[in-house]
Image: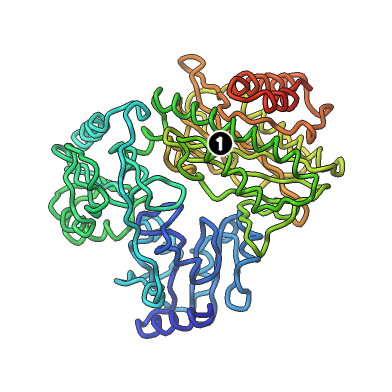
Amino acid sequence: MTNQRKLNDIRDIMKDSGLGGFIVPRTDEYLGEYVPACAERLAWLTGFTGSAGGAVILEDKAVVMSDGRYTIQLVDQVDSTLYEVANSQEKPLAVWLKENLPDGSVIGYDPKLHTADEISRIETQGVTLKAVSENFVDRVWQDKPSKPLTAVTLFPEKYAGRASQDKIADIQAQLKEQGADAVLVTMSDSIAWLLNIRGNDIPFIPVALSYAIVPVQGKVQWFINPDKVKDITLDYVELFNESDVSEQLKTYRKVWVDEKRTPIYFKNILKDNNVTILNKEDPCLMPRACKTVAEQAAMKQAHIRDGVALVKFLKWFEEEAPKGELTELSVEEKLEGFRAVAPEFKEPSFTTIAGYGANGAIVHYRATQATNKTIKSGSLLLLDSGAQYRDGTTDVTRTILIGDVEPQVKENNTLVFKGHIGLARAVFKKGTLGKELDKLARSPLQSKGLNYAHGTGHGVGCYLSVHEESAGISPRGERGVEAGMIISNEPGYYEEGEYGIRIESLVLAKEVDDATLCFETITLAPIDKNLIVIDMLNQEEISWLNNYHQQVFETLSPLLDEEHKNWLREATSEM
């Protein structure tokens, strides 16, 4: 089907349903960042493959929108004859609807794909919404893939640091305090953390798509295809078919629901059956974000393993890139090959971003056969990648110089690096908000009138989501940083049509004393010294770089042969 035909068919359904529009978000029934092939509705309809965004179809116009990370990608992927494109940070979906809807229009939406919070924000703009019983895209999508059916495995307690029964008991104690009968858990990574299980239902994140209810006493009710759990036994869990969750919710009097993270479909069921709703944050969220001592140790081991793979890759790249025969896709494949040597390797933690030259300026770029650039001398490679190992998750970005570039490029890279160091060296009060720490990373760039359109840091799970909800470090970061959180440190700068720069390592929030925290950088990979203007760094920044490189060498060199050890010695030598 052509994109025009898809639009026409959905508009016919809208007309038959008496609706003036339909919303197509980029999510699934579990509201995750990554979705199975059967839930890639936005990509199927519009061609936009970003991990965030949505579309609105009206009778005479349509829009596809996402945030600042995807500005360039939207223009490249979306047919401008069919859709407008919009930056959702500048004009949220609700505002676009208010400005473009004819008077009296009613907009349809799938209640399984939106939270109560989202729907409320749209309705406060005066937009009239109506839930539909069947997604309009699904009615048109004739060759839609089947739902995933993969085996669930146990996540060892030696990595998790806590038994699932203890986590459940903590939540049940909270339920008792709140006078609630149960809590509904719909986030797949929360369920994986709570039950100490992992799955393989979606790309990059080892979760099993399912729902769970934790009652105030008794076993956890887990709503999942039973064929997924044939190979494991959980004595503290009672299994149900996924379709049973609605009926089970009706049996309670008061249910804890996170309305910001739960489909409004479930809120509607509870309301229709006179069940009292306790609207509180998912009780797994913060315990999951604050890693146990065992999780911290496991994550560090994963990063040592990852560092070895990165050193081998960087040496190979340094030798091969000047020949002018490498491409973005061949680089991506080679890097995964180095990681896959480790028996603990499971899969990448996201699609590798190997952006050469102008492609590096596309923040969440993904190389395809159509966009695949040959890597030549005289520009930068922005390489953002990560891995899922059986004991931890990694996410690292290094910007690599090929040949030489204009001095301004190196100066901009050094400004980014100064921001990276500023955050890495931060010592701050417990509970400091992410938006306050964000200023440390942006200030060197902003002093020159420069900036970047993405957040500086996101939480990272322990063999879970590479983008885990935690204390996000961004201008909008309203959550305080707590000990045990593992967060990315990734300032950047992007010159559209020319190059991109980003330097990313993961940091662990650690206690300095009873009132103070600091960050420990746990990523172990050399930073390209050829892109650093040493005169722009003060002595503390130079010392930080030298100490970090010394740590990288001392940690990784015993695991390398002489050839790679010698390369790493030079790559981490003092400036």
Residues 400 and 473: in front is 400
Instruction: State the quadrant of the C terminus.
Output: top right
Rendering coords of residue 237 (x, y %) = 19, 41
Among all residues in the image, which is located at the extreme right?
A: 406
Residue lying furthest top in this view? Answer: 513
Q: Which residue is mark 1?
A: 488
State left or right for residue 150 relative to residue 239.
right
Q: Nearer the viewer, residue 169 or 282?
A: 169
**Of all residues shown, which one is farthest toward the front?**
562
- From the viewer's side, name the closer residue of 482 and 436: 482
Q: Quadrant of residue 168?
A: top left
Crowding near the residue tagged with mark 1, few <14, some 14–19, many ≥20 C-alpha atoms within 10 Å: many
Which residue does the image show at 67% across and 38% down from the upper left?
398
Identify the image's colour scheme: rainbow, by chain, secondary structure or one colour.
rainbow
Q: Is residue 211 above or below residue 214?
A: below
Question: Can you say whether 554 is above or below 453 in the image?
Answer: above
Image coordinates for residue 21, horizontal then vertical, percent: 44, 76
- Report the residue at 59% width, 38% height from top: 396
| Amino acid type, residue under disc 1 in the picture | Ser
Give the quadrant of residue 557: top right
Asked if residue 37 can be seen in this view, the reply is yes
Residue 460 placement (x, y as % from top left)? 48, 38
**Residue drawn at x 46%, y 48% as measured from the top left:** 204
Q: In front here: 105 or 311? A: 311
**Number of numbered labels in the structure image:** 1
In the picture provided, is 2 more to the left or to the right than 495? left
Residue 443 seen anywhere in this rendered image of the structure: no
Dot 1 falls on a residue whose secondary structure is: strand
Q: Position of residue 440 (x, y in %)?
A: 65, 32
